[in-house]
Amino acid sequence: MGLIHTIKGDLEESTLIKTEGLIDNENERTTWVEYRLPNSDEIIHRSAHVRLKQNVSMESKIGEF
């Protein structure tokens, strides 16, 4: 496996606890991954990717000003 860049330095992925998640709705698809040390609740690495499914329109908000 590879190295993961964390707040504790670069650590071997196989030594960490990995958690992945997904949010998928009509507006967005978001995936995320977190790494923790074994026997710890401290998140030492977190990354996310957000993909918008629809164009974000600001016209209605601009008209409110």
Image (cartoon, rainbow, N blue to C red):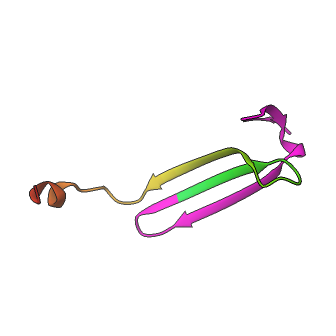
- At a point 65% along the width and 46% down the height, the residue shown is 46
How would you classify the magenta stretch by its main secondary structure?
Answer: strand
Residue 55 percent coordinates (x, y)? 31, 56
Q: Quadrant of residue 5?
A: top right
Q: Quadrant of residue 2?
A: top right
Q: Nearer the viewer, residue 48 or 44?
A: 44
Q: Quadrant of the N terminus?
A: top right
Q: Nearer the viewer, residue 35 or 40?
A: 40
Residue 40 percent coordinates (x, y)? 83, 53
- At a point 21% along the width and 54% down the height, the residue shown is 58
From the viewer's perspective, is 34 left or right of 59?
right
From the viewer's perspective, is 1 left or right of 48?
right
In the rendered structure, which segment of residues is drawn in magenta? 1-29
From the viewer's perspective, is 46 left or right of 15?
left
Q: Nearer the viewer, residue 2 or 11?
A: 11
Q: Is residue 26 magenta?
A: yes
Residue 16 percent coordinates (x, y)? 85, 47
Using the image, determine if residue 18 lies above or below residue 4.
below
Q: Quadrant of the C terminus?
A: bottom left
- At a point 45% along the width and 61% down the height, the residue shown is 28
Residue 14 percent coordinates (x, y)? 88, 44
